[in-house]
Amino acid sequence: MSTKSTKGIWKVISASSMGTMIEWYDFYIFGSLAVVISTKFFPSDNPTAAFLSTLATFAAGFVVRPFGALFFGRLGDLIGRKYTFMVTLLLMGGATFLIGCIPSYETIGFMAPLSVLILRLLQGLALGGEYGGAATYVAEHAPVGQRGYWTSWIQTTATVGLFISLMVILATRNILTPEQFDEWGWRVPFWVSIIMVGVSYLIRKNMDESPVFAKAKSEGKTSTNPLKESFGNRYNLKFVLLALFGATMGQGVVWYTGQFYAMSFMKTVMSIDSSQVDTLLGISLILGTPFFIFFGWLSDKVGRKYIMMGGMLLAILLYRPIYKQMYETTSVKNKTEMVEKTTVLAELKENKKQTMDSIYTTNKEYVDGTTFQEIKTVHLENGAVIIVDGKPKVDTKTTIKINSSDNWALIFLVFVQVIFVTMVYGPIAAFLVEMFPVKIRYTSMSLPYHVGNGIFGGLLPAISTYFVTNAKDLGHPEFYLEGLWYPIVIAAVSFVVGMVYIKNKDKNAHV
């Protein structure tokens, strides 16, 4: 590209961004609905185990992303960027739509979780080929010296996809009754994606191939074996490993902590009403998203390294204080209860197995406007309490509706985490593109990105939730902070490697 021309680049940005945003939307509605999905596709006997199984299935889609990066990255370097990420778009959209069609566990048994797992694996493979193609495509259209700015628009798509997934879920919840949403309405966000995929396909169909790749292909300079040249060449492999351990590994855990773990933490650990969490997270994302562009632009001026490393360092130092403040802000232990308004309702209800359960519903109100509801279900058999592992079989669901002041406090605390995300994620596409030559770029940059985000980042919700659950069972007084050790340690390792070995490259170099 010339140093000044931006002709047609907005068309490139919009076409690439829309498709990538839809793929992230498809990927994230599963995570956003994890609490509901755990009751649909997994055995209901143990809600905690079902939720952890759902997170594990969610993580499985991330684990296979590196394989998608290898497969589609190779195709992208052999036949071109455009056609490869059209295939990934259709694969992702089809898998998402079908997840919304799978019958529940009660209907088809273990075929339900198995089907979901297979479709999640297909989604992961598709996403593994999508991001590298879109980032490479935009970077190869961008003028020299402006790659950070232009590729940062692609970086917003993951957050925008998450935001739209939250808004579609929220709208569906508001249109339907709670019973309708629980019965079938949760499937609607999965079905909606097929419409967006169709529109995006029509837009991408009319795109041209990347000029840099087209030139290399016309001159016979494309790779005949991208995998061998990317990972069989010791010099290039060194940069692949450096990109992984010095940048994408830390970036991955910061991304998922600041957005996905924050959401999961508020819903499952803090027990805040699901709709309130979706709304406040959506506001935080809206406020934070422009900073992707800002830090991408800034990286063109001062270099990529110190912005990314700065985001990691802030996360390492501030995660525990932030999450402690989040938990303490809404904890009812710190609030004054209006005892006269407390109600307890006991009743017998028929469950789905057509046996009776004892349901105890406790409602509390607090002086600051917070409301608390606890529904305790004691499972019975022939009128006696069911005993499992020597303990009564009891399920407890707690829902806290927070007041306006606490709501804005949480918005601010999540927004701060999103700023860390924008610092590490805004410049990283340009950083990765600049590390590798044109003929093996799609393959070389995709693998470290998807290992860092797919393996290290994608496993975060499941690992951190397990740490919290385990610490709570052991009676740890600050059990809710234990899940943070995983992202803190991973980000710290990445920060040290990045500071020592990554150079603040010339951001005006040609790609």
Image (cartoon, grey):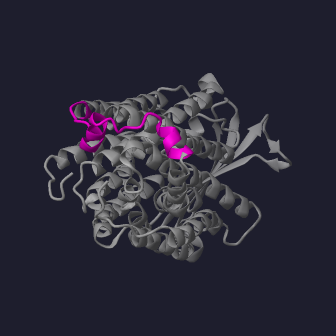
Q: Determine if the magenta segment contains residue 229.
A: yes
Quarter holding residue 421: bottom left
Query: Please, is residue 23 above or below residue 472 in the view?
Result: above
Q: Position of residue 152 (x, y in %)?
A: 31, 57
Q: Position of residue 379 (x, y in %)?
A: 72, 42
- Left or right of 417, for residue 292: left
Q: Residue at x 34, y 50 (%)?
A: 157
Quarter holding residue 172: top left
Span shown in magenta:
204-232
Would residue 64 be seen by someone viewing this image from the given angle? yes
Q: Nearer the viewer, residue 126 or 21?
A: 126
Q: Position of residue 378 (x, y in %)?
A: 71, 46
Query: Please, is residue 480 above or below residue 7 in the view?
Result: below
Query: Please, is residue 405 above or below residue 8 in the view?
Result: below
Would residue 24 be seen by someone viewing this image from the given angle? no
Q: Position of residue 14 (x, y in %)?
A: 23, 45
Q: Nearer the viewer, residue 146 or 267?
A: 146
Q: Residue at x 56, y 62 (%)?
A: 270
Quarter holding residue 113: top right
Q: Determine if the magenta segment contains residue 507.
A: no
Q: Nearer the viewer, residue 482 or 44?
A: 482
Which residue appears farthest toward the top when viewing the image?
Answer: 108
- Left or right of 339, for residue 152: left
Q: Residue at x 22, y 44 (%)?
A: 12
Q: Residue at x 53, y 35 (%)?
A: 120
